[in-house]
Image: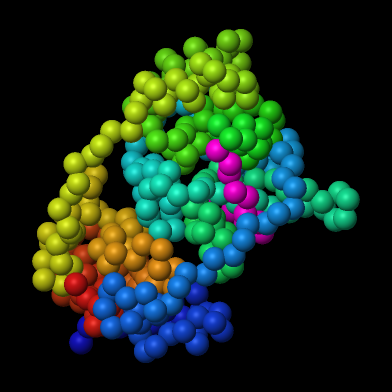
């Protein structure tokens, strides 16, 4: 008998599901948010407005910035990270909630509100960007960044640098020091500008000196958004490459080995948990179906510890394909929507 796991059942990652999620579940698996087919959209995504409290870009000390700056930040240009060192959504320039390209929609950042009354201010919670609708979904149901787990209580829309350069700079200046490090610039480019950010990341150490005139490892707003600045330069010289579209993924039910190979895009012989979530979201074409996105992530969270007992964060081909392995469990959990 194949294992069946219900999100929110004993042994699941979230033992206390929210009441609204319990009432939405219809049986098991992907029933939440689906009608009779995988393309049905019977339950619209939950979308709330971003917070309207004024955003204050406030400098932080080292301890306050632990969620904000990655290990490549600081003086000097950053060095490219390998795919295995970053979240799968960062590797492909996607939103970590819906796994669609970040620059395809309006983006937002997560914020934390501090103080009371006239002293109330809002600062960035972490360095990551999300689609605006997805960020609001996170605020309602999770209140933690899915990449770095930093807590947050607000969402800030990131304006276009061309339309509102001051607001844009304040939003992308993660640590609020009035200047941007190489990693802050790269995150903003990846999220908002249609450019070949892979090539920019490789050449950033050489390019950085073009705008970092004083050699302190940072650039300021005018060096970014003015005529001839960094954003105009990379948009002109690093246009987004059109990638050849891949064929549709194989069926996880009928061809699990081929499905594994299709989504093991880095050729590591393993699939990390977020790679599995991304693969299922794209296989089932969930897109902006927020209830189903929540449900699929809960199911993967619930079963993952069974197949990753050492906590490495990844499963290999054997663990995926063995009898009653991860593939069989996912197919059993999908019920009528298996593919």
Taking the view exactly as shown, the residue that stands out farthest to the front is: 163
The boundaries of the magenta stretch are: 148-160
Figure disc tally: 0
For residue 4, above or below residue 148: below
Asked if residue 293 is among those painted magenta in the image, a careful observer would answer no
- Quarter holding residue 154: bottom right
Principal secondary structure, stretch drawn in magenta: loop
For residue 222, above or below residue 323: above
Is 149 on the left-hand or right-hand side of 154? left
| Residue 165 position in % (x across, y down) | 62, 31
Is 192 on the left-hand or right-hand side of 277? right
Q: Residue at x 68, y 56 (%)?
A: 51
Q: Residue at x 44, y 68 (%)?
A: 290
Q: Residue at x 23, y 58 (%)?
A: 316
Asked if residue 159 is among those painted magenta in the image, a careful observer would answer yes
| Residue 199 position in % (x across, y down) | 34, 27
| Residue 111 position in % (x across, y down) | 65, 51
């Amino acid at each position: 008998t194949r294992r069946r796991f219900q999100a929110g059942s004993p042994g699941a990652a979230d033992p206390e599901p929210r009441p609204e999620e319990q009432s939405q579940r219809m049986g098991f698996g992907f029933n939440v948010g689906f009608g009779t087919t995988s393309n049905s959209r019977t339950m619209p995504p939950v979308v709330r407005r971003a917070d309207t409290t004024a955003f204050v870009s406030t400098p932080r000390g080292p301890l306050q910035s632990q969620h904000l700056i990655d290990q490549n930040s600081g003086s000097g240009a950053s060095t490219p990270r390998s795919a295995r060192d970053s979240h799968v959504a960062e590797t492909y320039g996607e939103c970590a909630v819906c796994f669609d390209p970040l620059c395809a929609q309006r983006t937002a950042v997560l914020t934390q509100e501090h103080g009371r009354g006239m002293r109330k201010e809002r600062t960035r919670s972490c360095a990551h960007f999300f689609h605006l609708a997805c960020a609001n979904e996170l605020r309602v149901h999770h209140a933690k960044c899915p990449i770095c787990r930093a807590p947050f209580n607000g969402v800030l829309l990131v304006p276009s640098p061309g339309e509102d350069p001051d607001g844009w700079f304040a939003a992308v200046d993660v640590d609020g020091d009035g200047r941007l490090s190489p990693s802050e610039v790269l995150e903003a480019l990846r999220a908002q500008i249609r450019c070949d950010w892979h090539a920019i990341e490789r050449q950033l150490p050489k390019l950085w000196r073009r705008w970092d005139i004083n050699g302190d490892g940072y650039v300021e707003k005018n060096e970014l958004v003015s005529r001839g600045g960094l954003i105009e330069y990379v948009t002109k010289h690093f246009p987004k490459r059109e990638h050849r579209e891949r064929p549709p993924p194989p069926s996880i039910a009928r061809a699990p080995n081929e499905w594994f190979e299709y989504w093991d895009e880095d050729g590591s012989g393993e699939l990390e948990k977020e790679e599995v979530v991304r693969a299922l979201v794209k296989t089932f074409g969930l897109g902006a179906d927020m209830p189903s996105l929540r449900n699929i992530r809960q199911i993967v969270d619930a079963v993952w510890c069974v197949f990753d007992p050492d906590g490495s964060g990844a499963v290999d081909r054997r663990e995926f394909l063995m009898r009653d392995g991860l593939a069989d469990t996912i197919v059993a959990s999908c019920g009528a929507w298996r593919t």
